[in-house]
Image (tube, grey):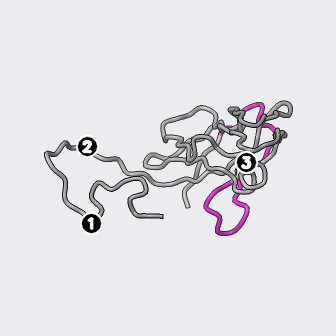
Amino acid sequence: MIELKLLRLPHGQGLPLPAYQTAHAAGADVHAALESPLTLAPGGRALVPTGFCYEIPAGHEMQVRPRSGLALKHGVTVLNAPGTIDADYRGELKVLLVNHGLEPFEIQRGERIAQVVVAPVSAARFTEASELSDTSRGAGGFGSTGR
């Protein structure tokens, strides 16, 4: 387990730290640091503050992912899922939510709005080549393996 430093912002006062809800959960839930409720209209999107900045260790990223219950019950999800927070970013974590549901959805202060997963990353050195090795799949892309 790695240690992750957080900086609580003034509008994050009183909110819980990100937390894993079960013993083997991969993602820790983050909460809305709203001053007042926010209503997402159907098709609407909003950048929702969480009230914390993070110091992510070098060689890692923080992925922002939807909460499955919000997606299933209300059609509310993270628009750019998974969002990536890079190790050198020190600003506030904000979550880009979208309402794909048919009804307006109200977000309350302190509501769990997304989950974050801290994961190792590898840097690549990109090298141009005149050809690539053959595989059984080849250049088959979208839908090439069937339904």
Mark 3 surroundings within 10 Å by alpha-carbon count, few (fewer than 14), some (14 through 19), many (20 or more): some
Q: Residue furthest left?
A: 130
Residue 102: x and y in percent read 78, 43
Which residue is labeled 1 in the image? 136
Of the two numbered discs 2 and 3 in the rendering, the one whose residue sits closer to the viewer? 3
Residue at x-position 69% and y-position 48%: 114
Mark 2 surroundings within 10 Å by alpha-carbon count, few (fewer than 14), some (14 through 19), many (20 or more): few
Left or right? Give the position of 81 relative to 72: left
Separation of disc 1 and disc 2 at Cα?
A: 24 Å
Main structural element of the magenta stretch: helix, strand or loop?
Answer: loop
- Residue 18 is a magenta residue: yes
Separation of disc 2 and disc 3 at Cα?
A: 38 Å
Quadrant into which the N terminus falls: bottom right
- Residue 75 is a magenta residue: no
- In this picture, which residue range is highlighted in magenta? 7-28
Left or right? Give the position of 60 relative to 33: left
Residue 68: x and y in percent read 69, 56
In this view, the residue in front, 96 or 32, is 96
Q: Secondary structure at mark 3?
A: loop
Q: Amino acid at mark 3?
A: Gly
Q: Amino acid at mark 1?
A: Ser
Residue 75 bears which disc, if any?
3
